[in-house]
Image: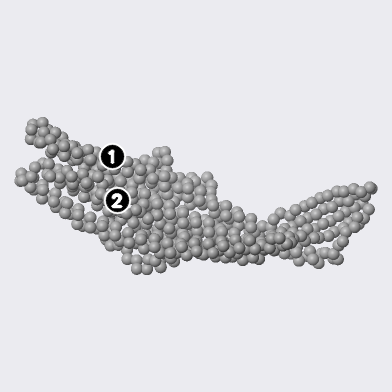
Amino acid sequence: MTATLIPDPRRVLRPLAAAAALALLAGCASFSPDGGFGGVEQAARQHLAKDLRWARSGADREAIDRRVAELLQQPLGADAAVQLALLNNRGLQAAFFELGITEADLVQAGRLANPGFSFGRSTRGDEREIERGLHLNLGRLLAMPLLREVEQRRFAQAQGLAAMQVLALAADTRKAWVQAVAAEESVRYATQVMQAAEASAELARRMAQVGNFNPLQQAREQSFHADAALALARAQQARLATRERLTRLLGLWGAQTAFRLPERLPDLPAAPRDLPEVERTAIAQRLDVQGARLAAEQTAKNLGLTRTTRFVNVLELGLMRNGSNEAPTQSAWEVGFELPLFDFGTARVARAESLYGQAVNRAAETAINARSEVREAYGAYRTAWDIAKHQRDEIVPLKRRIAEENLLRYNGMLIGVFELLADARSQIAGVNAAIEALRDFWLAQADLDMALVGKPSLSAAAAPAAPAAAAAGDGGH
């Protein structure tokens, strides 16, 4: 057997071995103690002032269950509902495990690929030859620092995405809580309208029996009673739907679904927020804007990696040791690489450049949308505050004053019982409209809070007046 050897291969192998050893030492980074959860937890404290916990073990799950039980012992306020959702929502817990997945990729990127070993035995007459080979992916070794940097940025992106999911869940939970409490109030007032309608319809029926009511008057009262019954059924369905949505966000089931809510929404603040620099604030702290910027930067660096490694797609280092029973043992090394005869890597570079252009434009779009969304959210917030204040300070007091005057006129026998009942229905409908205005304000504030830190899900414009309110107007005399 013959073999061509480069003189003194140890002089060539020594630097490569040193480089491999350094890469292995640098790449064998262990997993972080918190799995990257610390940054997400800090974002929750900074923007929400709430605790966050990742249930990675049975002990963590038990601690969360104890905290959930404590929160459910009292009527669930808005802040308590947000805290409960952040601890107990299983979708959010599943999102946290994405951190573990990306961190595993980061650690893997810092580790050299396993070497390959080959063993061969051949015979030729009485001669037996044994070949042993050790192969190492040298291209992976050279590109390891760049690959690790790419995975580090992807891990940072995963942290940002998890933080965004935390903030989005908090905003959705707060809005669901507002809608559920408002629905409870609406059912209560719709019930009062129904009671007034029943009394009016029964009185009309009796008066018609004795001939003191004509068919048209009786039909009007019966029509109002039918409308009130329909409005109550719709209000009860809305209460069920909003409560179930809140239950899903809280991650509750079984006996936990019997949680209690406050009887009414919080009062309207004395004054709205004044945010003259609302756009600048949003651009500075919105996590989706930061994430889009980070994605563009990562794509740019990935483009540099693609250009750097376009000719070293396959690069291997091999060590060989041959033994024979008729010749001295032979040692050698070899380096194998891909010849760029047909594929010069231009397609991969062009693709990376297109991805970079795409990321830059998406980052610009995110920033433009953020400015528009925060302007819309702030405008809706101020308008909702003005409407709720007008309802509280103008409409409701006027309705109350009219009711007091009509009661005096009824006591003086200047109006009849049906006029008094119609006015009572109108006053109840006015209170229900005030509840809806207050609900819309708190929804608008939740949207504004989210728009300042991330992409909001802006509430639709206020719906038309409820059927009960319209019915109250139709039932008047």
The CA span between labels 2 and 1 is 18 Å
Image quadrant in which you'd find residue 204: top left
Would you say 328 lies left or right of 392 here? right
- Is any atom of residue 24 visible in this view? no
Residue lying at 44% horizontally and 66% vertically, measured from the top left? 284
Q: Is disc 1 placed on a helix, strand or loop? A: helix
Amino acid under disc 1: Ala
Q: Is disc 2 placed on a helix, strand or loop? A: loop
Residue 385 lies, in percent from the top left, at 28, 59
Between 234 and 51, the one lying in front of the other is 234
**Labels 2 and 1: the sequence-earlier one:** 1
Which residue is situated farthest in the front direction here? 342
Task: Check whether the beta carbons of the residues at disc 2 and disc 1 lie within 8 A of each other.
Answer: no
Residue 135 lies, in percent from the top left, at 76, 56
Would you say 152 lies left or right of 431 here? right
Residue 326 lies, in percent from the top left, at 94, 53
Residue lying at 42% horizontally and 40% vertically, measured from the top left? 253
Circle 2 or circle 1, nearest the eye: 2
Q: Quadrant of the C terminus?
A: top left
- Is any atom of residue 37 visible in this view? yes
The number of numbered badges drawn on the structure is 2
Residue lying at 19% horizontally and 39% vertically, measured from the top left? 223
Residue lying at 32% horizontally and 63% vertically, measured from the top left? 273
Would you say 8 lies left or right of 453 here? right
Q: Quadrant of the N terminus?
A: bottom right
Residue 412 lies, in percent from the top left, at 5, 46
300 lies above or below 77: below
Q: Which mark is residue 233?
A: 1
> Dot 2: within a 10 Å radius of its alpha carbon, few (fewer than 14), some, or many (20 or more) residues?
few
Q: Which mark is residue 463?
A: 2
